[in-house]
């Protein structure tokens, strides 16, 4: 039944009017406005010091300006990011604004009108003075649907969200029947952004038609992939958008309870979402009788204790019920028997955050973005060896090559691309031949990787794929809950074999055991963690087999990363007589002076930290690396003369 | 009645039981370890009871599948056996294989499974691994031998059945998961008259302390196979 009537509409209009007025009043025309990105990534890069420097310099100079902390736009390479709206100028985005630059900006830009071009990233609007950010591929090849307002809003201020059209989708949903809302989501083709890509509308429909009196909606914000932080950024930068999506979902499936399961390691996200829930409750947009309708929704926050496996939906439910976070066999699926045996919808942060825009602009609009089978946008956190790491929201179907080489600027330091690991620790490692692969659920699965929740690690020629596979299986076997045989024992065997190989103790037959065991774990494990954990091994075995073989047969690490298989040496022809730069850098006194007053490394003592390579002045460039380690020239340490 | 075809045999079954339970009652053996007759939910953790069902892309755990009318099942396909052998090899690779000194000798589920599947008890294929037992496994009445334990969860299930809640629980996680009891006070333990966990353990990984001598564990077990 539709819930909205003229009273509801009037109530909502009043709310919007008040919000717009508050936002309008808080703007002080004629004064400069300084927006500082203060999400976790900004804070880590020093945004607190930047803000303090702005405040101090403004006070010192007697300039009146407003400082507004905002969320994150996802451009991690440029943190701390600051946008300055100075009357008479376009809004300008500055990157890497340290405390010193902040002071300079106040003095030069706000006081004297010099925008300090050397610090500018770009203008946010067209103008004759400064190139806009939209001239860069990092901006113009992106398509922001979920993250459109991230970094533009103050996440602690519901009025800003409301003034920009927030919660209109909830109102629109209330004007529709729950069935119509679900149909809209089905028509949009939205697929779950948590990794598996299950059609969201069908999940909602199943939960709606399931028997049960106390249905629940859970937002899964237990983001645990190494190097992935999309959910955190959305929670910290635009929490109301998520709450709106959550409310629409609860209305559609007729749930009165919602839980946001978020990692306790995300304190700022927890704070932001808690504050947002309070504010929305006070505005009558959550809680009992939302906007005066018969629809009520109580939202609570549950802080997970950091077990990776609790991101798996059945383990998450166990954890919420106060039990050990161990996955359960599916079926029954949570939409039939979930939290406290009641029908439960579990959606990822990005899925729920996509909902308001879909409801507002319609399924047909959403379908225009992305591909036929995977409509909409994908959010990746691209990290590792790229020039412009950070969060990227792209239309589904964008090729990997375009994402890595155009949007993220390619590989720094003139190194060669080697592989990209997609989909978190259980994703696959794909080589350069996959650069034309479109990013969507089905293409990536076909390639042996997966969409996952959107972690993407780019590796250059200095990465050893055997070591990378070892790293990821080390992570997953550590995070295995220990319930089922294959994941508990099988992943440990894989880790042990890979550890042996990286130490040069690999045997013929190891690769066959690795492949067979990986396939069995993939087929026979109980939950998604075990079923996907062998992906990095299976893909690297397929695409980088010769690298494994070099480790086993020649005791050679082609990337010269495995310590046991490499050695550092000093080229006596290049080493400068009398130079001592490397000696002080060595933590174990392995460097000695030769008879010819040059330097050499005692291989017995060397711990292969590589500090001497860094310390050696570039004009000599005398420290080299070889693999296998026997190739290092042996130089006798001169006998110390007895005094 | 539901009609099911297992390995070419037509079987008629009632509702409410898993395929595994039905097959076992009919004398069709499917390897299993964590399934416990009469328990409401099987944990499906041992990953041994795989069968191939017509129409399913991969083998499925039969303890979690209710039979349906017209179901066609094969219990002995190549891929089913491969997974079962692989699972057993993994379990044996962390099991302290010392049958001569084990009270379960000749009535041991691992021995039976090894014989049925043709897997050697001491496999050369995988090296022997040892868990790090970092928790205190002391219990006033019972002795745990984690090196034997296969984590089938049966002791936890029967303890829950006898006491409404389970005194036994999993501790640690992943590879180092063990079964233990955190209650150390003998006066607060209802164990003195109850032997349910001892009786159900299929591998003698838990037994009464005063029977320790009989269980040949007065001295810590050596590990000839560990690397």
Image: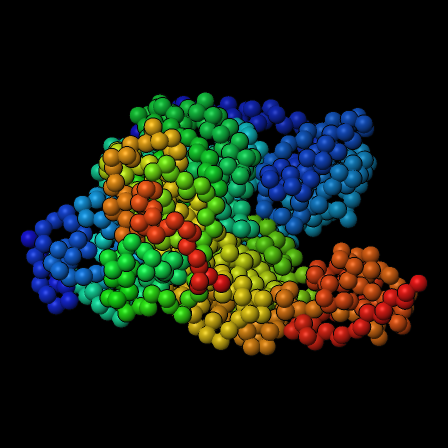
Total numbered labels: 0
Q: If the image is split into quadrants, where does the C terminus of chain A sit?
A: bottom right
x%, y% of residue B179?
Answer: 37, 45
x%, y% of residue B58?
Answer: 28, 63
x%, y% of residue A477?
Answer: 46, 54
> At 32% from the left edge and 56% from the top edge, which residue is drawn?
B102
Along the line of sight, the residue nearer the viewer: A126 or A76? A76
> At 10% from the left edge and 65% from the top edge, which residue is drawn?
B9
Left or right relative to B70: residue A118: right
Left or right relative to B164: residue A412: right
Q: Is residue A283 above or below residue A316?
A: above
Left or right relative to A443: residue B51: left
> At 38% from the left edge and 42% from the top edge, which residue is drawn?
B180
Q: If the image is split into quadrants, where does the N terminus of chain A sit?
A: top left
Q: Quick check: can you spot residue B29? A: yes
> At 80% from the left edge and 73% from the top edge, which residue is drawn?
A636
x%, y% of residue A187?
Answer: 33, 49
Q: Is residue A604 above or below residue B188?
A: below
Along the line of sight, the residue nearer the viewer: B163 or A622? B163
Along the line of sight, the residue nearer the viewer: A7 or A245? A245
């Amino acid at each position: 039944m539709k819930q909205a009537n003229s009273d509801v509409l009037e109530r909502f209009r009043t709310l919007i009017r008040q919000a717009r007025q508050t936002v309008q009043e808080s703007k002080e025309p004629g004064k400069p406005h300084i927006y500082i990105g203060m999400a976790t990534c900004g804070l880590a890069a020093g945004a607190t010091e930047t803000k303090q420097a702005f405040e101090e310099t403004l006070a010192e100079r007697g300039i009146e300006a407003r400082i507004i902390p905002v969320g994150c736009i996802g451009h991690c390479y440029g943190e701390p990011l600051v946008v300055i709206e100075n009357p008479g100028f376009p809004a300008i985005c500055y990157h890497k604004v340290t405390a010193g630059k902040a002071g300079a900006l106040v003095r030069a830009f706000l006081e004297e009108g010099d925008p300090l071009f050397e610090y500018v990233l770009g203008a946010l609007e067209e103008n004759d003075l400064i190139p806009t950010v939209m001239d860069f591929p990092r901006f113009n090849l992106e398509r922001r649907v979920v993250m459109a307002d991230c970094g533009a809003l103050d996440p602690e201020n519901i009025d800003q969200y409301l003034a920009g059209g927030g919660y209109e989708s909830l109102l629109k949903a209330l004007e529709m029947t729950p069935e119509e809302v679900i149909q809209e989501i089905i028509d949009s083709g939205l697929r779950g952004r948590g990794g598996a890509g299950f059609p969201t509308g069908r999940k909602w429909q199943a939960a709606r038609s399931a028997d049960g009196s106390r249905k629940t909606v859970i937002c899964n914000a237990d983001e645990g992939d190494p190097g992935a932080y999309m959910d955190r950024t959305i929670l910290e930068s635009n929490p109301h958008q998520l709450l709106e999506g959550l409310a629409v979902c609860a209305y559609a499936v007729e749930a009165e309870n919602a839980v946001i399961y978020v990692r306790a390691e995300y304190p700022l996200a927890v704070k932001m979402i808690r504050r947002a829930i309070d504010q929305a409750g006070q505005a009558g947009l959550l809680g009992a009788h939302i906007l005066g309708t018969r629809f009520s929704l109580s939202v609570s926050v549950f802080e997970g204790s950091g077990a990776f496996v609790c991101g798996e939906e059945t383990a998450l439910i166990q954890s919420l019920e106060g039990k050990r976070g161990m996955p359960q066999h599916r079926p029954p699926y949570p939409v039939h028997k979930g939290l406290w045996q009641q029908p439960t919808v579990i959606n990822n942060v990005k899925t729920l955050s996509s909902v308001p825009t879909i409801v507002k602009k319609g399924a047909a609009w959403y379908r225009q973005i992305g591909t036929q089978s995977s409509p909409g946008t994908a959010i990746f956190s691209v990290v590792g060896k790229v020039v412009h790491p950070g969060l990227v929201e792209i239309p589904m179907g964008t090729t990997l090559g375009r994402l890595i080489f155009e949007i993220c600027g390619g590989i720094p330091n003139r190194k060669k691309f080697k592989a990209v690991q997609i989909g978190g620790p259980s994703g696959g490692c794909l080589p350069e031949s996959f650069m034309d692969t479109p990013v969507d659920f089905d293409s990536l699965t076909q390639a042996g990787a997966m969409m996952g929740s959107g972690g993407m690690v780019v590796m250059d020629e200095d990465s050893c794929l055997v070591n990378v596979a070892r790293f990821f299986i080390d992570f997953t076997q550590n995070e295995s809950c220990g319930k089922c045989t294959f994941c508990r024992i099988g992943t440990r065997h894989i880790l042990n074999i890979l550890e042996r190989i990286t130490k040069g103790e690999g045997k013929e037959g190891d690769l066959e055991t690795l492949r067979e065991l990986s396939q069995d774990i993939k087929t026979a494990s109980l939950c998604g963690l075990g079923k996907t954990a062998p992906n990095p091994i299976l893909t690297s075995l397929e695409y980088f087999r010769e690298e494994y073989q070099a480790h086993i047969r020649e005791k050679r690490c082609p990337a010269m990363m495995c310590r046991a298989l490499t050695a550092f040496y000093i080229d006596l022809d290049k080493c400068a007589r009398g130079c001592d730069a490397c000696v002080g850098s060595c933590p174990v006194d392995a460097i000695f002076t030769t008879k010819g007053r040059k330097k050499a490394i005692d291989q017995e003592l060397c711990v292969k930290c590589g500090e001497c390579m860094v310390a050696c002045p570039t004009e000599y460039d005398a420290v080299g690396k070889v693999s296998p380690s026997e190739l290092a020239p042996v130089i006798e340490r001169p006998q110390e003369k007895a005094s | 009645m539901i009609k099911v075809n297992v390995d070419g045999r037509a079987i008629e079954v009632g509702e409410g039981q898993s395929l595994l339970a039905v097959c076992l009652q009919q004398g069709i053996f499917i390897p299993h370890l964590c399934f416990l007759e009469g328990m409401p939910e099987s944990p499906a953790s041992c990953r041994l009871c795989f069968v191939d069902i017509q129409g399913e892309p991969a083998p499925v755990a039969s303890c979690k599948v209710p039979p349906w009318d017209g179901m066609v099942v094969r219990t002995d396909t190549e891929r089913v056996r491969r997974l079962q052998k692989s699972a057993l090899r993994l379990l044996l690779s962390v099991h302290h294989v010392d049958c001569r000194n084990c009270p379960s000798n000749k009535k041991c589920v691992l021995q039976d499974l090894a014989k049925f599947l043709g897997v050697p008890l001491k496999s050369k294929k995988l090296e022997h691994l040892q868990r790090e037992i970092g928790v205190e496994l002391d219990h006033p009445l019972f002795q745990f031998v984690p090196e034997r334990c296969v984590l089938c969860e049966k002791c936890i299930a029967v303890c829950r059945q006898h006491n409404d809640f389970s005194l036994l629980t999993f501790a640690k996680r992943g590879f180092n998961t063990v079964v233990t009891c955190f209650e150390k006070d003998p006066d607060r333990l209802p164990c003195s008259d109850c032997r349910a966990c001892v009786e159900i353990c299929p591998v003698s990984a838990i037994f009464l302390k005063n029977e320790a001598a009989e269980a040949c564990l007065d001295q810590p077990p050596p590990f000839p196979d560990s690397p």
